[in-house]
Amino acid sequence: MMIDPSSPAWVAARVGRLTGSRFGDAIAKQKNGKWAASRENLLFDLLAERLTGVAKDHFVTPAMEWGLLNESPAVELLEVRTGILFDKAGFCLHPTIEHFGATPDRFIGIDGVLEVKCPTTKTHLQYLMNKTVPVEYQPQMMAEIVCTGRKWARFASFDPRMPPNQQLFVIDFNPRAEELQEAEQLARDFLAELDAMFERITLEAA
């Protein structure tokens, strides 16, 4: 199942579901090994969505608007640089984990996904200097891989304010099979906790 992100059905399909963009919140931990507050916040956000059927309001920041505005130019430039045409993607539900889905920015061939970010110039420069897959986006890309049944991801950072030869930073992400399996298990555990919360509150209200 794949749903076009430009359609109203895309928003509706994500209600109450764990999605790739928030998978990092679901598995975030503190330095002491305990779950981070983002996990509990996400549990209650999704519980509220399940009970009401209404998606949580998301404030669109100027940074988010910038990203939306520049995603297509980033993809077009990447296509020119690589000679590869990418296919549009949509919201894809995991084949076996109910209520788990992700929306890659594009599909690459038959086994890759593309994730595009258009950050601040400072952050883009850090990516250019570090030359590694940003840790903060690895959970999202793993979710995209397992939900689409693909094998690898490509991360691209784009900043049109930079000189032409420094506008793009591109790096491939190839997680090991065991890392992907662990990600799937973490998704199952999170959703099992969400199911338990839903069952508890609905039974108490009966």
Image (cartoon, grey):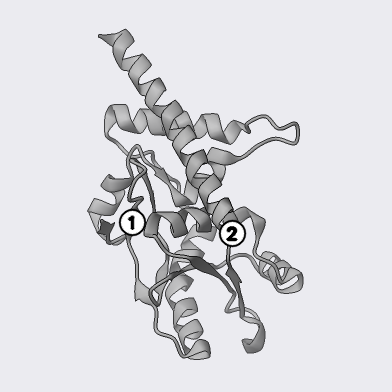
Front tag of 1 and 2: 2
Q: Residue furthest front?
A: 178
Residue 71 locus on image (x, y percent): 46, 71
Tag 2 secondary structure = loop
Residue appearing at x 57%, y 35% in the figure: 38
Question: Circle 2 is placed at which residue position?
Answer: 176
Residue 142 locus on image (x, y percent): 52, 56
Residue 201: name its quadrant: top left
Pick the residue in front: 134 or 70: 134
Up the image or down, 146 lies above or below 192; here it is below
Up the image or down, 174 lies above or below 45; here it is below
The answer to the question of whether label 1 and label 2 lie on touching residues, with beta carbons closer than 8 A, is no
Residue appearing at x 42%, y 64% in the figure: 150
Q: Amino acid at mark 2?
A: Arg
Query: Visible in this render: residue 123?
Result: yes
Q: Tag 1: Cα neighbours inside 10 Å, few (<14), some, or many (≥20)? A: many
Q: Amino acid at mark 1?
A: Phe
**Position of the C terminus by quadrant:** top left
Residue appearing at x 58%, y 66% in the figure: 174
Mark 1 and mark 2: Cα distance apart in space: 23 Å
Please report whichever mark, 1 or 2, sits nearer to the chain's N-terminal start.
Answer: 1
Residue 26 locus on image (x, y percent): 53, 39
Up the image or down, 130 lies above or below 180; here it is below
Tag 1 secondary structure = strand
Res 91 label: 1
Residue appearing at x 33%, y 56% in the figure: 91
